Image (spheres, rainbow, N blue to C red):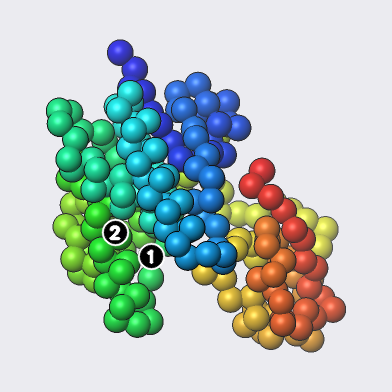
Amino acid sequence: MPQRILSTLATWSDTPCWAERVDSIRLSGATSEGGNLFARVFQELYNGVKLWWLSRRYDAVVTDCSPHVAVFGLLERLRVGAKRRHLMCECYWSHMSGRLARIAKTIQFRAGLTRRSRAVVYARRERERFSAYFGIPVQRFVFIPYHTTLLHFVPSEHAPPLATRYLFAGGDTHRDYRTLCEAVTGLDIPVVIAVRERRLLEGIRIPANVEVLTTDDA
């Protein structure tokens, strides 16, 4: 009997090879920034309870590392009977600048990763580093190359032949576009930056050789 999988990575539902096997849900407001703090906390609590309640009909759950996953993890520990297998993706974890921030993130990540959970990291060395920094057993971290590839895809280390060489940078998370723009200023090299949130470039002087594109999840 095939495993039933629930995912909070809503974009998976747009990919045929995954949509056939995974039920994707979108938790409203889970990643919102700004606004009323109480409202955001309540939304995360609601999302965590909702995810836990819906997961009772599934064999496995796939999530990112949003705060509501900690609520799901705590409730999962209280579940009577079989526990859900849980895979956590998009673990863009880093060292916290302050002690309180580190304590808060440590509590969040520990709560979200149960004995039935595995967090997918982006490098082998992150297994040991995250384990030591957050006090989580190293066995709960796994390194899977190209783990978010949703289509049948064969990666290549060689770029396709182009009439003009250019430099590309993309993404909204953990990017330092200010330093990039300063580094390429005055160079005779076209540069393309692709982001979803143009506000990430506010206050940055964009050189003449840099083109900024706004894209979306697709």
Up-down relation of residue 189 to residue 57 (above or below): below
Name the residue: 31% across, 45% down. Answer: 72
- For the N terminus, the quadrant is top left
Disc number placed over residue 93 in the picture, else none: 1
Q: Position of residue 152 (x, y in %)?
A: 54, 33
Tag 1 secondary structure: loop
Q: In which image quadrant can residue 35 be found? A: bottom right
Instruction: Give amino acid for label 1.
Output: Trp
Do the residues under discs 1 and 2 have CB atoms within 8 angstroms? yes
**Residue neighbourhood size for the residue with mark 2, other residues' Cα within 10 Å, grouped as few (<14), some (14–19), many (≥20):** many
Q: Which residue is mark 2?
A: 109
Q: Can the viewer see residue 211 in this picture?
A: yes
| Circle nearer the N terminus (1, 2) | 1
Q: Position of residue 12 (x, y in %)?
A: 53, 36
Name the residue: 34% across, 75% down. Answer: 101
- For the C terminus, the quadrant is top right
Name the residue: 20% across, 69% down. Answer: 132
Up-down relation of residue 112 to residue 189 (above or below): above
Count of numbered circles on the image: 2
Name the residue: 33% across, 26% down. Answer: 58
Q: Can the viewer see residue 166 in this picture?
A: no
Front-most of residues 151 and 98: 98
Tag 2 secondary structure: helix
**Residue neighbourhood size for the residue with mark 1, other residues' Cα within 10 Å, grouped as few (<14), some (14–19), many (≥20):** few
Q: CA distance from mark 1 to mark 2?
A: 10 Å
